[in-house]
Amino acid sequence: MTKIIECIPNFSEGRNEAVIEGLAAIAKSTPGVTLLDYSADTSHNRSVFTLIGDLDGIKSAVIALAKYAVEHIDLTKHEGEHPRMGAVDVIPFVPIKGVAMEECVALSKEVGEAIATQVGIPVFLYESSASAPGRTNLAAIRKGQFEGMAAKMEKSEWKPDYGDSAPHPTAGVVAVGARMPLVAFNVNLSTSDVNIANNIAKIIRGSSGGLKYCKAIGILLEDRNIAQVSMNMVNYEGTPLYRAVELIKAEAKRYGVHVTGTELIGLAPAKALIDCAEYYMQLEAFDYNRQVLENHLF
């Protein structure tokens, strides 16, 4: 495979195992695509899939997955902690090998147009594919969520890039775009008070003046009765994971709580984790390229 693209579609379903396995079956059976990982969270009521493949394979898989999601996920009956606006909520494309960002942008536009015409879901382009500066940030597109999207789309500035100017009645809308790798990363707290998680999230996220490349919200994991700071680290070199963890630990002390654990959602680049090892092990004069065995082998 000379060109490899990663695609990480997020679906607004984390509880119905039959639907999740149906999505996985489609991904596994599409030629030119490998399903690397998929995971579901019942509190978020969301599942995240990680695919790699060539341009044609990824395009075919994503369109088929979107069709399945429309047929099997009804947002009028959906509840969960994670913000959402669509049955298939977001479809990012990431260049991995032999592919330029411009090719991922072009693919996102092809897929976006196909989803709008073949599946019937309005599409907003975001990140590097955004058609306007105000649409670069996924959070700006998703604001209002599924319930508020119809009124939002009546405004001229929120006309979708592809499809009707009204959300699909049960599947909403979807954001499609090209971006660099990010790390979906969560930190769990020793409290059930979601206000504490919200306060910490506001302090650490870049939009509030915190860590530049951190997006964060506070949520309650009802099945475990704990609060969580849920993050997207959009540039793990500009803002390392350990920096977010240490800042959350410091802020949590103000409320008499502590960090009980962290979790990755989907896959993460090795360097994002090795940077944490370097920090916590206090490695001196560490050379990632020279001293990591796998870098020499692969």
Image: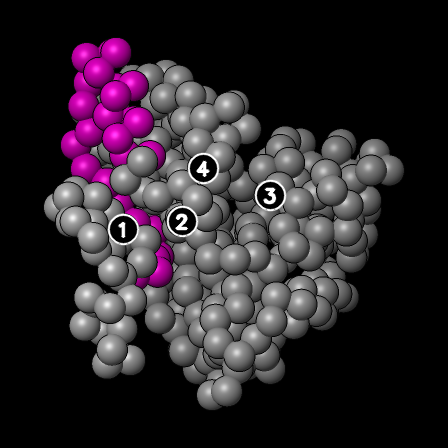
Residue at numbered disc 3? 138
The numbered disc on residue 214 is 4
Measured in 3D between alpha carbons, the distance from the residue under mark 2 to the one under mark 1, in whole angstroms, is 8 Å
Measured in 3D between alpha carbons, the distance from the residue under mark 4 to the one under mark 1, in whole angstroms, is 16 Å
**Label 2 or label 4, whichever comes before in sequence order:** 4
The numbered disc on residue 290 is none
Kindly indicate the quadrant of the structure image that contains residue 188.
top left
**Left or right, 65 with reference to 136:** left
Residue under the point 61% across and 66% down: 101
* Residue 97 covered by magenta stretch: no
Q: Nearer the viewer, mark 4 or mark 1?
A: 1
Q: Badges 2 and 1: C-beta atoms under 8 Å apart?
A: yes
Q: Nearer the viewer, mark 3 or mark 2?
A: 2
Q: Which residues are magenta?
A: 244-270
The numbered disc on residue 275 is 1
Quick check: can you spot residue 211? yes
Residue under the point 65% across and 55% down: 128
Disc 1 residue type (three-letter): Asp
Helix, strand or loop at mark 4? strand
**Label 3 or label 1, whichever comes before in sequence order:** 3
Q: Badges 3 and 2: C-beta atoms under 8 Å apart?
A: no
Residue at numbered disc 2? 237
**Residue 137 location, x and y as percent?**
62, 41
From the viewer's perspective, is residue 203 above or below residue 93?
A: above
Helix, strand or loop at mark 3? helix
**Label 4 or label 1, whichever comes before in sequence order:** 4
From the viewer's perspective, is residue 138 above or below residue 212?
A: below
Q: Badges 2 and 4: C-beta atoms under 8 Å apart?
A: no
